[in-house]
Amino acid sequence: MISDPQILERLDKSQSRITKAVFPFTTNHHDTLFGGQALAWMDEAAFIAATRFCRKRLVTVSSDKIDFKHPIPGGSLVELIGQVIHVGNTSIKVEVNIYVEDMYHDHREKAITGTFSFVAVDESGKPTPVLPVE
């Protein structure tokens, strides 16, 4: 359990929220959100949360277990919420959840969840500590 107040404050300030409309150019032949588009949006939300946390150059090194709980129909709204869930020496792990809601009805539910890992790198691309060394 993290108890350092500075890290807890960084975690709180790092959360990212992005809202998107699922337009036809983002859907597949079933008129649902294309999985590749969902992954790109999730990686973006995760990158923003990780960057807010450490304010360092980051590269995505993996995406872990993406669960597509149910399809997201075209014409829906989605909100992506990214939150840092683990901090290593040079790495950060971010969980991203996508919530779907109908544009014309007041209902919202989690549709997709996954985690993304990033490594902080210096100007030459070598791993560097995520947090300042004290």
Image: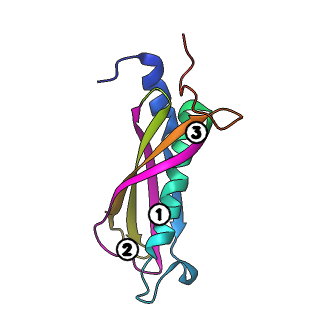
Which residue occupies the foreground of this view, 27 or 133? 133
Indicate whether 55 appears above or below 94.
Answer: above
Question: Which comes before the other along the chain, label 2 or label 3?
Answer: 3
Residue at figure coordinates x 46%, y 60% from the top left: 79
Residue 64 located left or right of residue 103: left
Q: CA distance from mark 2 to mark 1?
A: 26 Å
Residue at figure coordinates x 47%, y 34% from the top left: 91
Task: Identify the disc placed on residue 51.
Answer: 3
Task: Check disc 1 and report the residue beneath it.
Answer: 39
Of circles 2 and 3, the one toward us is: 3
Amino acid type of disc 3? Answer: Thr
Amino acid type of disc 2? Answer: His
Q: Splitting the image into 4 quarters, where does residue 51 fall?
A: top right
Indicate whether 16 appears above or below 101.
Answer: above
Indicate whether 117 appears above or below 54.
Answer: below
Helix, strand or loop under label 2: loop
Q: Residues within 10 Å of mark 2 (few under 14, many from 20)?
A: few
Q: CA distance from mark 3 to mark 1?
A: 18 Å
Question: Which comes before the other along the chain, label 3 or label 1?
Answer: 1
Indicate whether 19 appears above or below 73.
Answer: above
Task: Check disc 2 and report the residue beneath it.
Answer: 105
- Which residue range is magenta in the image? 58-87
* Horizontal and vertical percent position of residue 49: 52, 42
Quadrant occupied by the C terminus: top right
Residue at figure coordinates x 66%, y 32% from the top left: 122
Q: Splitting the image into 4 quarters, where does residue 108 fall?
A: bottom left
Q: Mark 3 touching mark 1, by CB under 8 A?
A: no
